[in-house]
Image: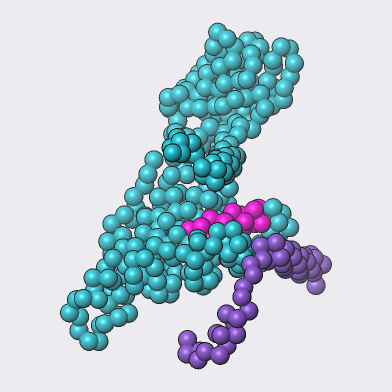
Amino acid sequence: MDPSYIYLALGGLALLGSIGVFFGIGLGLAAYKFAVEINPKVEAVHGVLAGGQ
Amino acid sequence: MPNSLQMPTDARISLADNLRRLGAISLFIWVFFFWGCRTEHPYVQNAVFKDNQEIVVTFSGPVDEAWANNRANFSVYEKAAPDIVADLQAAALSSDKKKLSLRLAEPMNRENPHTVILKEILAGGKSLGTASLTVAKPYIGTLVSILIGAMIIQNFVFSKYLGLCVFFGTSRKKSTAVGMGITFTTVIAFSSILSWALYQFVLKPFRLDYLQVVVFIGLVSLTVQGVDTIMRKVNPKLFKAFGVYLVLVIANCIIIAVPLTLAQNEYNLSESLMLALGAGLGFLIALFLMSSVRERIEFANIPQSFRGLPIAFIVAGLFALSFMGFSGMSLF
């Protein structure tokens, strides 16, 4: 096979991988920096209530 | 009695805060406009059409008269047809030696951008290199026509039938429609700028544009999730107003159509932003129109089998027919 295709495929893998890592770290940092405290009771009450929708 | 002219402290803080925000926004807008308007040579300030036979080039300092009077130093052609060089009738320098006017023998079509080549610009006996300048009609006209084109003439909902699921889902009430439209416009502006940058600086140079769909979907999700996370903390009121619509934006086809369009048409940053804003505002208009009609349809006497979605589809079809009236319209 033409080596340029292999380079293209590897480049694509590298791009998608780096985008995944980059976006993941970015979102993780954002979630850490802009963390909002949510009362755990809200979740608990939601869990007990009937969840039709 | 407190002095009514004195502002309370928190009001002053919020004023300063708002001013800072305004400053940041205007800086962004200026950067954005100058990106589209820079000239191609540092010594040339601008090059414009004077009438349909004359082009005026303004330099930032005086140039040598002998160089300017030699017609062989200049050539003018249409940007799309570089092998058809226009006949130069005269080249003249203004008295302050900063403005060079090039007169052509035949009138040119100012609709098309032209290229002016200035060979080896001489200023004070020193050569400043060759300049290749693009002369085009004011750029703002192009931008406005992209905006209006995406908003009305080629409305994504009514003439391309994109984003219909969200369109029918959130157009039952005016308040939901406007909320969805505003949320959508915000997110699409952000994600289009990001995808423009990623396309121009990563995908195109490394010949990875076959991955554009995957990458753009990822970018859209990133933007939506990012706006969700940040807005929740920074502006809870606005977050509440965005509500469930923010998540619905991911499922909209327009948000993926816009990055693909701007990649295909090779738009620059300002054109991309205009296309994104046009698509967002067009979606807002479509939702608002549709919701106004559907609020009234609730009370109309409609045959049983047409109630709900079927009549909504018919209304959307009628809107699409009326939007066809804009087709073929051109601005500027």
Looking at this rendering, what residue extends furthest in the front direction? B1
Residue visible at 55% across and 43% down in the picture: B9
As displayed, is residue B63 above or below residue B309?
Answer: above
Q: Is residue B120 above or below residue B133?
A: above
Residue at left offset 64%, top offset 16%: B61
Q: How is the image coloured?
A: by chain
Please state the horizontal and vertical placement of residue B48, each as a whole percent of the image: 51, 27
Query: Which quadrant of the rendered structure holds the N terminus of chain B?
Result: top left
Q: From the viewer's perspective, is residue A19 above or below residue B309?
A: above
Q: Which residues are magenta?
A: B185-200
Task: Tell me if residue A19 is in the magenta stretch.
Answer: no
Taking depth in this image into account, of A6 and A32 the one nearest to the observer is: A32
Report the side of B177 relative to A33 (left or right).
left
Residue drawn 45% across the image and 36% down it: B3
Instruction: Name the residue furthest top.
Output: B95
Chain A display color: purple
Q: Considering only vertical position in the picture, is A2 above or below A43?
A: above
In the foreground, B322 or B105: B322
Name the residue located 55 percent from the left edge and 85 percent from the top edge. A46
List x then y, in percent, for residue B196: 61, 54
Q: Is residue B63 left or right of residue B52?
A: right
Residue B328 visible somewhere in the drawing: yes
- Expressed as whole percent of the image width and height from the top left, the position of residue B178 reads 39, 62
**What is the quadrant of the C terminus of chain B in the image?**
top left
What kind of secondary structure does the magenta stretch mostly adopt? Answer: helix
Residue A19 at least partly seen: no
| Chain letter, colour cyan | B
